[in-house]
């Protein structure tokens, strides 16, 4: 089971970023640049937590962040001002192991999704994706969705999909120092980054 933030601890800012293992090859003699795409593109986010009373929630928060260097941490992916509403109980409708199309079933009829809206698909861990085009479920609650980044896990029929509350699951950023500051007011100040591990 992944770790979660202590109850009542809610980040007050989030800076999302894309981890891309590809790149652009630029020839040194002025020829055309070539885009090199590599599998495994994933998401990360830098969170800042408002000052927290150390003896109240702060100690538990520090403990979980330290453990999340090797365990996984699960945090809601915020979409400020956007309310997806009721969507039903979405599930993967057809097995898929790659590409940018995901067949979804179990949605409420005529449920709309918007370009840029996020979802997480669950297969052992959560995998965060964004709808890359608007879409509407048919009368039976089925939707063939365009998503990004490309699928990097084998999803099987009936794997759950989280749309109303997508979540990011990963490690506190490897290679980034985890530090926190304690004030004379006995408050904890901390920020941290979570990057999908798979």
Image (cartoon, rainbow, N blue to C red):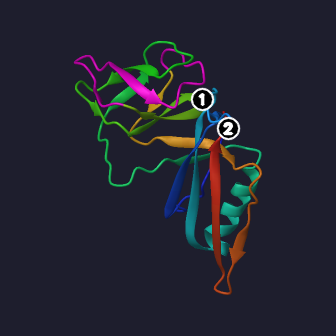
Comparing 92 with 24, the one in front is 24
Residue span colored magenta: 133-158
How many dots with numbers?
2
Question: Main SS of the magenta segment?
Answer: loop
- Residue 3 visible in the picture: no
Residue 151 colored magenta? yes
Decide: few, some or many residues near mark 2? Use Cα within 10 Å; few <14, some 14-19, many ≥20.
many
Whether residue 173 is visible to the viewer of this picture, yes or no, is yes
Quarter in which the C terminus is drawn: top right
Nearer to us in this view, 198 or 75? 198
Give the number of the disc on residue 73. none
Quadrant of the rendering where the N terminus is positioned: top right
Q: Decide which of 63, 197 is in the foreground and name it.
A: 197
Q: Which residue is mark 1?
A: 34
Which structural element holds mark 2? loop
Nearer to us of marks 2 and 1 is 1
**Residue 55 at x, y = what percent?**
67, 74
SS for dot 1: strand
Picture quadrant of residue 30: top right
- Hey, which quadrant is residue 81 in on the image? bottom left
């Amino acid at each position: 089971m992944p770790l979660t933030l202590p109850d009542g601890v809610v980040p007050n800012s989030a800076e999302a970023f894309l981890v891309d293992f590809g790149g652009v090859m630029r020839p040194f003699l002025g020829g055309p640049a070539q885009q090199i795409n590599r599998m495994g593109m994933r998401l990360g986010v830098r969170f800042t937590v408002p000052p927290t009373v150390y003896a109240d929630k702060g100690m538990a928060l520090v403990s979980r962040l330290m453990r999340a260097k090797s365990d996984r941490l699960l945090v809601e992916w915020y979409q400020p001002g956007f309310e997806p509403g009721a969507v039903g109980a979405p599930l993967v409708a057809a097995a898929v192991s790659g590409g940018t199309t995901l067949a979804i079933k179990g949605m409420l009829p005529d449920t709309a999704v918007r370009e840029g809206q996020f979802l997480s698909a669950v297969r052992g861990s959560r995998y965060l994706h964004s709808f890359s085009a608007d879409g509407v479920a048919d009368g039976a609650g089925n939707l063939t969705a365009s998503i990004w980044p490309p699928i990097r896990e084998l999803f099987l029929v009936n794997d759950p999909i989280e749309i109303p509350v997508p979540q990011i699951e990963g490690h506190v950023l490897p290679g980034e120092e985890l530090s926190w500051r304690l004030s004379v007011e006995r408050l904890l100040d901390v920020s941290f980054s979570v990057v999908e591990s798979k």
